[in-house]
Amino acid sequence: MVDLTPDTVTDAVLAQMADTPDARLREIMTAAVKHLHAFAREVQLTPQEWLMGIAFLTEVGQTCTPSRQETILLSDTLGLSALVNLMHDSTHAHDATDSSLLGPFYRDSSPKLALGDSISSEPDTMPVVFLGQVRDQDGHGIAHASIEVWQTDAHGSYDMQIHGESRMDHRARFEADASGHFHFRTVRPLAYYIPLDGPVGRMVKAQNRHGCRPAHIHFLITAPGHRELVTALYLGDDSYIDSDVVFGVSEALVITPQPDSTTPFPELPAIRYDFTLAQDAGMAASRVGADPSKLMQTAH
């Protein structure tokens, strides 16, 4: 037996993990231990502070429900989700539409609507029409691509925050036409505060951050033979466009509604945006997130 010191305990842990059969698990856990131990040494972490951290992480997990994903929210507000997305984007062989965050409010099984339908069941503000094309990297339309969309209502709330799991609104799934074109109606989304009533919210407030996301609409686009695209489009006139609390905005994803008499709804402001999908190179899905209810099932 050799007594451990602050300088030798890391090597002792790594030695115990050295025979991990899964090479990728061994690589990830080795790096995690090295960086966690280095963090503790750098800040001279005290037992009381680490117990506070453990209590915080415990509460983050306990706050998760089938309609709320506090752990994804933590990843998002620490910029870790954005970092993983950016690294994943850099593996594209060719240019494709920038990704953005799936976020904690995604749900599987959105209702399938016909092109031109409204995703808002009871719009109480002027709608806008959204239209565009899903293309491959040669600029050709991708027939019958699947397009999932979800957003806040015109008052800044997601359906999950209002109705829990009992009702879906302001979200839908569309199928592009044979040329990859699509269009639908929606309400203009609103900037909103992330949930601030839990442990992540307390962390954000303690850091003197505003806790707001600029107005945006989410997209998840898939087509056979192409890489899944998880992204969002952001309204350029939003006051939080340069300070998104979860670091999801890129310049290429900023949009502005414009008058457009050539759309199927010429009386409505329009947003045109074309999405480019990368070819499928056998990569895993590009999602940092999931339907909260599915993560709860996986955890159990």
Image (spheres, rainbow, N blue to C red):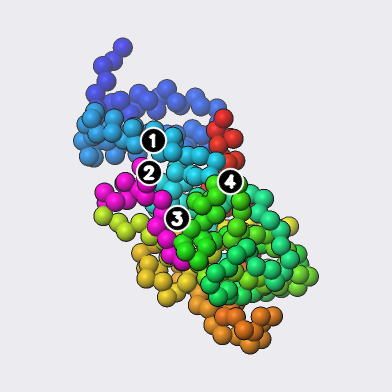
Distance between the alpha carbons at the discs numbered 2 and 4: 19 Å
Residue 192 location, quadrant: bottom left
Q: Which label number is shown at residue 232?
A: none
Foreground residue, 199 or 275? 199
The residue at the point 73 percent across, 66 percent down is 114
Q: Which residue is mark 1?
A: 59
Estimate the x, y position of residue 253 in percent, counting from the top left: 50, 69
Question: How many marks are shown on the rendered structure?
Answer: 4
Q: Which residue is mark 4?
A: 165
Q: Which residue type carries mark 1?
A: Glu
Instruction: Give above or below for 20 relative to 259.
Output: above
Q: Which residue is mark 2?
A: 198
Estimate the x, y position of residue 118 in percent, counting from the top left: 65, 68
Q: Which residue is mark 3?
A: 82
Which numbered disc, 3 or 1, marks the residue that appears first in the sequence? 1
Q: Which residue type carries mark 3?
A: Ala
Distance between the alpha carbons at the discs numbered 1 and 2: 8 Å
Question: Which span of residues is magenta-colored?
Answer: 190-207
Q: Which residue type carries mark 2?
A: Gly
Cβ–Cβ under 8 Å for marks 2 and 4: no
Magenta stretch holds residue 118: no
Cβ–Cβ under 8 Å for marks 3 and 1: no
